[in-house]
Amino acid sequence: MKKWFPFLLCLNVVFTAFASTVDTLVVYSKSMNKNIKNVVILPDSYQQKGKNYSVVYLLHGAGGDHKAWLSKAPEIKKYADEYDVVLVCPDGDKTSWYFDSPVDNAMRYETYISKELVAHVDKTYATIANTKNRAITGYSMGGHGALSLAFKHPDVWGVAASMSGGVDIRSFPLGWDIAKRLGSYAEHKENWENNTVINLVHLLNGKNLKFLFDCGVDDFFYDANKRLHLKLVERNIPHDYIERPGGHTNAYWSNSIKYQMLFFSEFFK
């Protein structure tokens, strides 16, 4: 037994460190007539027969792709095991902002994620296909996308979150290709007003969605997040809001996702 003990200990360390499985799921988007790559992280327990899982969708920021979350917060693989959930990281183009563009029919990422991707994930994997077991979050552009999609589609997501989210895009009329998706603010003001998160609060009834958002006090999106919080308070919409030290950084998002995963897990329970 003494000869085998170190070997068994070594095996245990290997299995613990590499428990979750990372897949690349290619989904054909009919609305955009193209194939889109998505990272899917399965928990170690996924091989159990007859078990279905809650799903958390993680949206990347501007300039990112489906692999961005793995590089910015590789510990999400651990969270898939710890909370026993499936994680899905879609490719949202580098600057789609996750809405259906009113000026470019080739950019329909709201339709893709809320309908095409969700349906494909539920068809492909052993998921619990209902709102009580489906969450969405993201950082920066992805934080805008997560709240925007959840506010518009409470029939798809029952819980949502955002970290460092660009929740009022009107403040950045020349930033991150937003004008390419909505037209210039000067000529297409209505498009901007109708697609910024802070103007979608009227879609909430205070009952159909549980959500959290946070932002570092040194972040350039901090003011917009605080204004969204105050608007929700004024309208008596339940929500969780967190301010903490930090800027628009990987370190902030890596820390934030820890708390958001706990928030989602409590909702799933």
Image (cartoon, grey):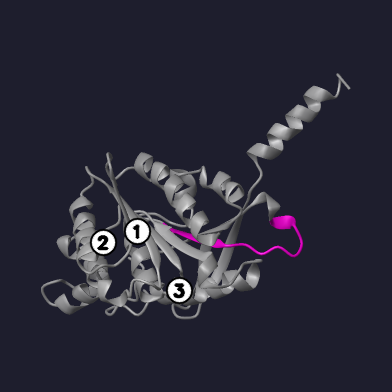
Q: Earlier in the sequence, mark 3 or mark 2?
A: 3
Mark 3: secondary structure:
helix
Alpha carbons under labels 1 and 3: distance apart: 15 Å
Residue 207 highlighted magenta (yes or no): no
In this view, 147 is above or below 42? below
The x and y percentages for residue 137 are 41, 59
- Tell me if 58 is positioned left or right of 3 in this view: left
**Residue closer to the observer: 107 or 199:** 199
Few, some or many C-alpha atoms within 10 Å of disc 1 (few <14, some 14-19, many ≥20)? many
Few, some or many C-alpha atoms within 10 Å of disc 2 (few <14, some 14-19, many ≥20)? many
Q: Residue furthest front?
A: 236
Label annotation for residue 105? none
**In the image, which residues are magenta?**
46-59
- Which residue was labeled with disc 2? 167
Quarter placement of the N terminus = top right
Kind of residue at disc 1: Gly
| Residue 96 can be seen in this image | no
Kind of residue at disc 2: Val
Alpha carbons under labels 3 and 2: distance apart: 19 Å
Asked whether the residues under the numbered discs 1 and 3 touch, taking CB atoms below 8 Å apart as contact, a structural biologist would say: no
Give the residue drawn at x 22%, y 44%.
Answer: 217
Label annotation for residue 143? 1
Give the residue drawn at x 52%, y 55%.
Answer: 265
Q: Earlier in the sequence, mark 1 or mark 3?
A: 3
Asked whether the residues under the numbered discs 1 and 2 touch, taking CB atoms below 8 Å apart as contact, a structural biologist would say: yes
Q: Earlier in the sequence, mark 1 or mark 2?
A: 1
- Which residue was labeled with disc 3? 114
- Tell me if 208 is positioned left or right of 5 in this view: left
